[in-house]
Image (cartoon, grey):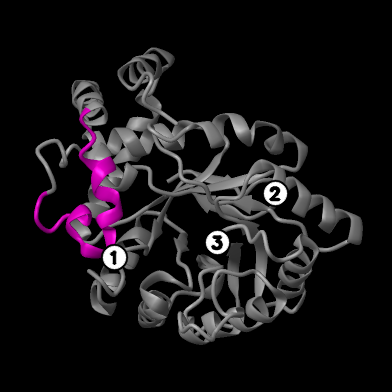
Amino acid sequence: MQYRRLGRSGLRVSVLSLGSWVTYHNQVDTGAAAEMLAAAFDAGINFFDNAEVYAGGRSEEIMGAAIRQLGWPRLNYVVSTKFFWGLDRAGDAVNRRDTLNRKYLMQAIDGSLRRFGLDFVDLVYCHRPDPHTPVEETVRAMSDIITQGKALYWGTSEWSAADISKAWEVADRHGWHKPVMEQPQYHLFHRQRVEQEYARLYEDIGLGLTTWSPLASGLLTGKYRQGVPEGSRGALESMAFLREGLTDPAKNAAVARLEPIAAELGGTLAQLAIAWVAKNPRVSTVITGASRLSQLQANLGALALLERLTPDVMARIDAATAGLAD
């Protein structure tokens, strides 16, 4: 396993990490979570990603219970959570959903710590930007969460470069804790934000990346070339919004062009796609997902492909997906 610093911080995270979106509670119970966490940890993975909204808080509960079952020393693993969507979707809970106001954030961190059964999380993210709350209010609340010892580092997820820069400048001006990392979607068909929009932030503020969806929600595994198979992520009713993209003819044709490249390198399509994301030195860690142990083990095989991604191979991958990335 390789380890990379999270931006300019001193924290080192495994280049591959394990996330719980979609799978925990919906497909993975505490026993299965403990089995996969143990296998990931044994392979060198030290970062485990979560969010308040995942399975309505149940994902945090399952991950926390699994970690307690495994009995790991707290120094040996990194856990994250994210806030914005809220848990209470009732119409009168106006300060508990789709917001980054101080009231919500200060209570949300306490709720997550209770569900995890932890004294602190390592990373906490603003899951989406909130145009209705002054950025100064959000930045100060996140900084206070760090000062109170409830989290060690804070960052953003799916924020624009302009919004990240503004948050960083506000924190710098007031002497507050600055955002350290961003969690963007990044894969072969979604590249512009990481490769162009954020380009200056890597040097200007030392932004680190914990990227998600390296397989484009499964599209880059090749399993959607003949439609949506039963039991797949795309078949879940909660994931219905993904289906049109997963069955896109042009992208699936590109996936077919990638298959022989993966085979020549001695890997699968999924391993090639994960390795391609990890090849970007700006990426601190690639968050992978798995609903079963065999899937996790297959994803770990991407590490073997990293050194085989020569400039020539990268050019062939670019040619195979040309014109299809946003």
* Residue positioned most to the front: 91
Question: Residue visible at 77% across and 68% down?
Answer: 137
Q: Nearer the viewer, mark 1 or mark 2?
A: 2
Marks 3 and 1, Cα distance to the nearest angstrom? 18 Å
Left or right: residue 164 compared with residue 264 = right
- The tag on residue 127 is 3
**Residue 1, image x, y percentages:** 42, 46
Task: Name which residue type carries label 2.
Answer: Ile
- The tag on residue 23 is 1
Whichever of labels 1 and 2 marks the residue nearer the N terminus, that label is 1
Question: Residue visible at 47% across and 68% down?
Answer: 51
Vertical comparison of 172 with 143: above or below: above
Task: Name which residue type carries label 3.
Answer: His
Q: Residue 144 lies in magenta, yes or no?
A: no
Question: Residue visible at 61% across and 80% down?
Answer: 95
Mark 2 Cα shell of 10 Å, populated few (<14), some (14-19), many (≥20): many
* Residue positioned most to the top: 312
- The tag on residue 139 is none
The residue wearing badge 2 is: 164
Question: Residue visible at 69% across and 73% down?
Answer: 101
Whichever of labels 2 and 3 marks the residue nearer the N terminus, that label is 3
Q: Magenta residues, as a range?
A: 229-249
Marks 2 and 3, Cα distance to the nearest angstrom? 12 Å
* Image quadrant in which you'd find residue 233: bottom left
Task: Name which residue type carries label 1.
Answer: Thr
Marks 1 and 2, Cα distance to the nearest angstrom? 29 Å
